[in-house]
Image (spheres, helix red, strand yellow):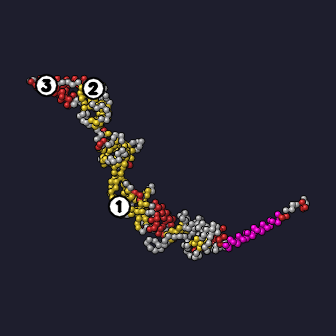
Amino acid sequence: MNDDMQPEGTPKKKSCIPILLVGVVLLLVAGTIAFFNVPAFHNLLHPHPADNSAMVAQGAAKYTCGMHPFIISDKPGNCPICGMTLTKIESTQASGGTAVAPSAPSANPSGGARKILFYRNPMNPNVTSQSPAKDEMGMDFVPVYEDEAKGSGGGNLPEGYATVQVGAERVQLAGIQSATAVRETISHPVRAVGVVVPDETRVRRVQAKIEGWIEKLHTNFTGKTVTKGQPLLEIYSPDLVATQREYLLARAGVDRMKESPYQDAREMSSGLAQAARTRLKLFDVPESFIEELERTGEVQRTVTLNAPVSGYVTGKEIFEGTRVMPGMDLLTVTDLSRIWIDADLYEYEAQSVRVGQTALLDTVADPGTKLKGRVAFIYPTFSPETRTLKVRFEFPNPGLRLKPQMYANVSLDLHSVTGVVIPDSALIETGIRVIAFVDTGNGSFEPREVKVGVRGNGKAQILSGVKAGENVVVRANFLLDSESKLRAALTKMTGGASASTQPQSTTPQPQPQGQGGHAGHGGGQ
């Protein structure tokens, strides 16, 4: 192709390329100069929190942006990124250009300066440093003081625990509360749900002892109240009629043999009369019926049977005209003036129950009912389905408030003892032991392993570990538990927390401004 045939715009496009290359080179040169000579631009592209801290330490008044902490200025103004007004930084760093981690008050409760053993990573206590440092997130390492690592509880502290030192203000902020251990009587209450059942010793069945027919029922429905000696029914029986006749004939023979000179004949006739009378009584013929028979000398077609006990008719198997046979149940009369409560207790509760112990009863149906009874019987076997032991309680039943098959709540106190008692909330269960924190004063809390006895009503008996009059922590004790374990771990790491056995630094130490880490950046100011 000839040059004459090339498009007219081609030479112009080639001439633009050198211009663009020159512009890019100029921008790179300007950016490099600004990066090394303009601190704000340098911090914007390559922030250094440690350098900013050092700048704050060197200047009397520095200003920063609340949204962009890496922006540091010597004069008030606005943030070059978001435009927010810069705020003044109060100097909390030590002079000299090296950032120092914030530390606790320099004096311990006993007086004197507190000695810093080393610094630990706030997120990973296993990472430590001999000098102040920062982690990968820019957080300051936390100083570990000698008194914190050693603790002040002596050699009686539980394994894995250390004494915790807390200032008075921190005690209030953390919500730590204490209660005094006192000496008082404590008992372990047991509460169970039972079922009301009739007292089996007060249940009486009225049965037929002879063959016959029910002529009349004086008690003709279930639930009727009867009293002892009250007529229940009238029965006709040929055997009863024959026995009445035999008794009258025997009595007549006794009268005839009174004038007999033979002693044996008189005794025989008297024995026959007595045997006939006894036979009537064995058939449950009332004494009043026999006396009426002796007075009138007339045989009665039916015999009236009376109630053997007072109570309620809880069973009825007969009607008027029913034929009965010997051994047949006629009526069941139950005395409900006293009742039983059958309740199930768990294995650990049943071991402490004894016959004769006092028990209290209340019901859902009648909340105002409070009855006092006793343990009447303890069953000898456990239930294989529920793994419980059935216990029988005996209670009075005034006004028939307790009905059979009604549910009732039974409670009794076990292990009533006197000893050192503290609130149950002061105990920390670890699975293998129980820990309580004792307030020894001046913001010091000492962990102790305690042995617990009887528990009940939100309190616990302490057999060992805490004495009467000492204060135990009842709130925020889990915070103290975690802090105590952490300090114990630090002590174990330092092998006793002496200055000569401090752990080696596992993180790079910060360098002063203008050295080490900033070499090649031209400084930060």
Residue visible at 56% across and 68% down in the picture: 140
Q: x, y (%) of residue 491?
A: 49, 65
Residue visible at 63% across and 68% down in the picture: 83
Q: x, y (%) of residue 339?
A: 31, 42
Q: CA distance from mark 3 to mark 1?
A: 86 Å
Query: Depth check: 169 or 388 in front?
Result: 169
Crowd class of label 1 (few under 14; some 14 to 19; many from 20; radius 10 Å): some
- Quickly name the residue at label 2: 215
**What is the quadrant of residue 236 in the picture?**
top left
Question: Which label's residue is closer to the chain start, 3 or 2?
Answer: 2
**Left or right: where 521 falls relative to 219:** right
Residue visible at 46% across and 71% down in the picture: 108
Q: Main secondary structure of the magenta part?
A: helix
Q: Amino acid at mark 1?
A: Val
Q: Nearer the viewer, mark 3 or mark 2?
A: 2
Q: Which secondary structure, mark 1?
A: strand
Crowd class of label 3 (few under 14; some 14 to 19; many from 20; radius 10 Å): some
Q: Is residue 88 above or below residue 302?
A: below
**Left or right: where 190 falls relative to 490:** left
Q: Is residue 416 visible?
A: yes
- Quickly name the residue at label 3: 254
**What is the quadrant of residue 25 in the picture?**
bottom right
Q: Quadrant of the C terminus?
A: bottom right
Q: Is residue 390 visible?
A: no
Q: x, y (%) of residue 233?
A: 26, 29
Q: Quadrant of the N terminus?
A: bottom right
Q: Is residue 524 above or below residue 386?
A: below
Span highlighted in magenta in the image = 13-38
Q: Contact (CB < 8 A) between labels 1 and 2?
A: no
Assess whether residue 26 is covered by the magenta stretch. Answer: yes
The image's mark for residue 182 is 1
